[in-house]
Amino acid sequence: MTDLIGLREWGYSDTPVRFTHGREGREEEDDGMTDFMTLTGHVDEYYNGVYWQTDDWGGYPHFVKESGDAHLFHLDSGSGYWQLDFRNQEATGWGELLDYYDGGYTSGGWNARELLDGDVSWSGGNTVNFEWGTAEFDPSTIVIAVEEEEVAYVEENFVWWIQAEGHPDDFYDGLYTRSADWNDHPHFEKPDGSAHLYFLDSGSGYWQFDYRQQDGTSDYYDGGYMSGNPWLEAINGTVEFSAGYITITQGFEEWDCDQGGCEVEALNMYIRLTGHDSDFYNGNYWFADSWNGFPHFAKEDGSAHLYFLDSGAGYW
């Protein structure tokens, strides 16, 4: 940890980020006290917040955000790296940690208290600050976020669809519906099964267009690719693929299953909301029972809702 004290190079951006951090000797005496860090000032507000030290990943320290949707962990590769990412690698059952760093990284050893203390510099001149704290808390009570899970209450015949426009190969333009996941990650296909848009879990991750049926482990991208995370927001709007700029719109609505695409009814997807002025409304919203016949999303604890109001032009 000592080599993380002061200014260090990180792999994220140019804007100051601030962390706060916890107590050493947690394994020596089980007194109910747990190390924590508070991260502030990150250019991506999603990664700001309180992180608690919890179960190791790959035999190395791992901290999880109190909201359960971000992780700080040590990757034992080369000289070693501390990395921020939103993916829960523990839930996948992978034997070896993958090199995920959506929130950036810095090189250094595994001792968090010595390395992640005080001001640390990220690549591009960004400054990060870690401070330590300790409190009585059981981190096992944190609910770890996952991309999707099987549930019983998903409304029948509702599907998530996307519309691709502007692809230089018009074969890949058109309507896609959410289909069975490939390799535990999102997969959309045209109703006739002729084309696919799927997330490839490789390196930093990629969204790829292709025409071949597979299980999501083959690196096929006849229609182009773009790097990104598996959240559906990554492919919303006009986005740059290797084939060019493509406009993707999305929707979630009742569907005529004769058109295909209703395989999604066994899955519950959620929307991740960030950047709201009231942090109370930030977080993950799961698709729940419809309200008045229209889509409705709710936080897991039921404390907040996102729903469609059928009034006038319609409102979310």
Image (tube, rainbow, N blue to C red):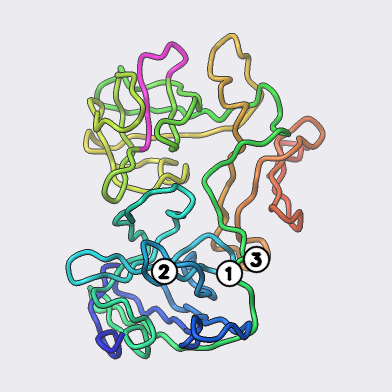
Number of the label disc, if any, that sits on residue 141: 3
Which of the pair 199/109 is nearer the observer?
109
Residue at (56% x, 22% y) in the render: 263
Residue at (59% x, 40% y) in the render: 149
Per the rendered image, the range of residues in magenta is 190-199
- Label 3 crowding class (10 Å Cα cut-off): few <14, some 14-19, many 20+? few
SS at mark 2 in the image: strand
Q: CA distance from mark 3 to mark 2?
A: 18 Å
Residue that carries the numbered disc 1 in the rendered image: 66
Q: CA distance from mark 1 to mark 2?
A: 12 Å
Which of the pair 178/141 is nearer the observer?
141
Quadrant of residue 183 within the rendered picture: top left
> Eyeballing the image, is 6 above or below 194?
below
- The picture places residue 276, in percent across and down from the top left corner, at 60, 63
- The picture places residue 107, in percent across and down from the top left corner, at 23, 74
- Label 1 crowding class (10 Å Cα cut-off): few <14, some 14-19, many 20+? some
Please name the amino acid that badge 2 sits on: Leu
> Eyeballing the image, is 52 above or below 290?
below
- The picture places residue 61, in percent across and down from the top left corner, at 40, 72
Q: Earlier in the sequence, mark 3 or mark 2?
A: 2
Image check: 268 left or right of 207? right
- The picture places residue 161, in percent across and down from the top left corner, at 52, 28
> Does the stretch in magenta take in 191?
yes
Quadrant of the rendering where the C terminus is positioned:
top right
Quadrant of residue 136 within the rendered picture: bottom right
Quadrant of the rendering where the N terminus is positioned:
bottom left
Number of the label disc, if any, that sits on residue 72: 2
Which of the pair 245/292 is nearer the observer?
292
Image check: 149 left or right of 127? right
